[in-house]
Image (cartoon, rainbow, N blue to C red):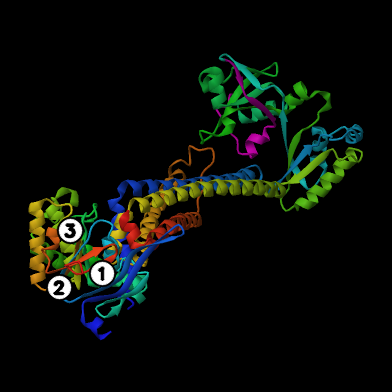
Amino acid sequence: MTGQGGNAGGAIIGLRLGLREIGSNARRSVLSLLSICLGIATVLILNSLTGGAKQQSLQQMNRMGGISMLTVESVQPATPEEEAAFSRSEGLRYEEMQNFVRQADCCDTLFPEGWHKDNSLRGPKGPKSGHAMAVNWLHFEQRNVSVGDLQETPTRLASAWDHGEEICVLGDKLAADLFGESRAALGQTVEYGKVKWRVVGLVISASRLDWRRGLAYYPYPAYLHHFAGKQDKLQTIKVRMRGQVEPETAVRELRAYLLKNHRGVRDFSIQTAEEQIAENAKASETLSLLGWAIALMALGVGGVGILNLMLATVSGRLREIGVRKALGANDASILAQFLAESITVSGMGTVLGLVLGGAPTWFLGDVLPVTPTLTLGDYGLALVLGWSTGLFAGIYPALKAARLSPVEALRG
Amino acid sequence: MTAAAMSLLRLEKVCKGYRLGKEDIPVLRDIDLEVERGAYLAIMGPSGSGKSTLLHILGCLDAPTSGRYWLNGQAVHEADATALAWLRNRSIGFVFQNFNLLPRLNLAQNVELPLIYSGVPASERKRLVQAMLERLGIWERRKHRPHEVSGGQKQRAAIARALVKKPDFILADEPTGNLDSDTTREILKLFSALNGEGHSIILITHEADVAQAAGSMRILRDGRLSGADGK
């Protein structure tokens, strides 16, 4: 006496009935569906943003000279002993770096960066908080900063810039903040660090959220003249290597040169672009892990939501389970019915979540500061995660329903 | 065993008890019952006599604590949960006091359920459901949900659901308990007609006039089953 179809036949019947029941419990189904949908959308959005950040960091690295750039930075003394030792050195200076580039075969171009402590700029519309970065003219030409509306010829401006004239280029957003309208700033002066700077151009960017649109640039020689004093001490400078030069060779040469100049004091650090990329990759890996942790928690919350709703469903449908058992439903068909409900609902929620979570990559790429990026693998993983969440969240309530004795269930 | 195989069902020394804390509460004591095919038997008893427990055992919804039960010659007392589900589907048609129709399904879908569980193909199900709803005079109400029809129509739908699989017997638990006297008469008349067509019926009730509609009657009192005369 084993029954005509046994557990397998019962399971197939239960699956069919489960699918039919979804429409009958629309409100509960929609709530369960939303739990998973939001969980999956969170997974995808966080994943697309961390993926985008990673890609953007690599692109930015490439724009700024790619792996041919070395970053040299001044090191601050951490202990009194170091402070005493560092005093023997004159520190990292622009002039010595210029000499290095002139005499060495490994490197050809310098990109100094100077930052003054003043953090507000003043125009006719009053002071606005913002930063100004001291750079040489090559910065615009070779590090992907487009400047438009130039007030003079590029040759004349390049010459004036590298001679340290009091001129500046403003991000168009900052210009609009200071002058009411960005183009109104052209030819006018803006005050920064108690010096008046004539606006000779505007930074142009395709992205509305490009941070450089809120930045001011002024000549590095002028920074040395007005703010750095006679010491000419550098905080950061980037050095571009000549083609075909191994980074290790360039680092070795530069380190030897600087140590000699600094009387053997290591008051500087040299980092290759590869090291920076590795550092960035590590940071984005951490970010990615954090994103996944948050996303999985959101999905877990969705799963608990389904579990809760399915348990409530089983409690609310005890009599129905009893009637079905009285009419011939075996444990397998009841189990399959409830599992089919939770898997189908979570499947629908997952698909909706894929659409919702994928939408930023399709529509918001130009608006967001980071271009969201997703691969087919990300979608596949999210699909599997969503479905398995529904499966795991549905198992316990479905087992509970299946194991109910018919008498107990009929009593409701 | 031969006798058991010949009759529709047979209970031998069936006992059922429940444990309440450390105490065993006997509900059914040494029930012996044999029902022939085509019988129309009423089991009558007052509240608390063990009627529901006996119904659950007869309906393969619950297992006896001890004793033996044969249904169509098959040893129910040895059956596992899957086999019991199969027996409920193939051999027993339940009619409940409160109808127990699923509220989200219409009458036709409710009647179709036992056929789905026995794997009957959709086209055959449709034909059988139509025939049964027409036989019970509720075909026009097939698309209505239970809350949209009268008590009598609900009970007719429940009887249609019980009969649609052509079970070995109908097991009715207080089938007129929620009906007015006119509808009660109508349903009892229907049971008599069904019995006349050869359907075996076991009716469990506490109402003497309902029990008297059956061909034979047994009395259940304090968990013991006696004849109509109480002996």
Mark in the foreground, 2 or 1: 2
- Quarter of the image with the C terminus of chain B in it: bottom left
- Quarter of the image with the N terminus of chain B in it: bottom left
Residue A132 colored in magenta in the image: yes
Amino acid at pointer 1: Asn
Residue at 11%, 50% in the rendered image: B180
Numbered range of the magenta stretch: A126-151
Task: Give residue A63's position: percent from left, percent from top.
Answer: 62, 43
Image quadrant of residue B51?
A: bottom left
Label at residue B89: 1
Amino acid at pointer 3: Pro
From what the image shows, is residue A283 above or below residue A75? below
The residue to which callout 3 is attached is: B175
Mark 2 vs 1, N-terminal side: 2
> Dot 2: within a 10 Å radius of its alpha carbon, few (fewer than 14), some, or many (20 or more) residues?
some
From what the image shows, is residue A95 above or below residue B107? above
